[in-house]
Image: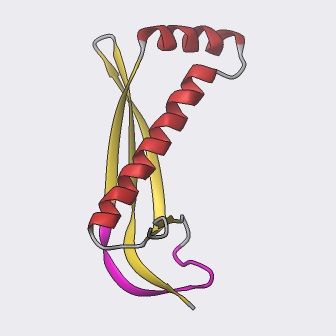
Amino acid sequence: MSAPLILTTSSHLEGYRVVEHIDIVSAECVFGMNILKDMFAGIRDIFGGRNKSSQNALRDARVSCLEELRREAGEMGANAVIAVDMDYSEISGGGKSMLFLVATGTAVRVEKV
């Protein structure tokens, strides 16, 4: 069994040497926000406090997007992705709300030093 593909927001990995820069890799994930979640988030905004359903949706989006990034990089022959960046956006209109997440990084092959 091979080691799991490493992801980091850093431009280098302590204890590893980059032996090959393969390519830029990205993953895009779009999630529909349930109308009830939107309604309760609005109520929570009025009264304050944390919104667990929105937090869970953000966490699910992050986990899914990072798994997609790993898959894409692995298919390129990488064993790590460095300089990972994540950007969240909300797309809404016509009574619908969508969470859009993009993760990007540089797919590389690394060796232990």
- Quadrant holding the N terminus: bottom left
Percent x, y of residue 42 = 56, 11
**Quick check: 18 above or below 8?**
below
Q: Predominant secondary structure in magenta?
A: strand
Asked if 58 appears above or below 93 in the picture, the reply is: below
> In front: 8, or 40?
8
Residue 35 spot, x, y in % from top left = 42, 10
Q: Is residue 19 above or below residue 29?
A: below
Q: Residue at x 48, y 13 (%)?
A: 38
Left or right for 112, reference 27: right
* Residue located farthest toward the bottom when viewing the structure as drawn: 113
Q: Give the camera-side residue of 6 and 45.
A: 6
Residue 3 magenta-drawn?
no
Q: Position of residue 76 (x, y in %)?
A: 27, 69
Q: Residue at x 47, y 62 (%)?
A: 84
Q: What is the tally of numbered marks visible in this picture?
A: 0
- The chosen color scheme is secondary structure
Picture quadrant of residue 2: bottom left
Q: Is residue 19 rendered magenta in the image?
A: yes
Q: Position of residue 106 (x, y in %)?
A: 38, 70
At horizontal 41% and vertical 73% (from top left) the residue drawn is: 79
Above/below status of 101 relative to 35: below
Quadrant of the image containing the C terminus: bottom right
Q: Which residues are magenta?
A: 11-25
- Tell me what residue is drawn at x 56 percent, y 9 percent: 40
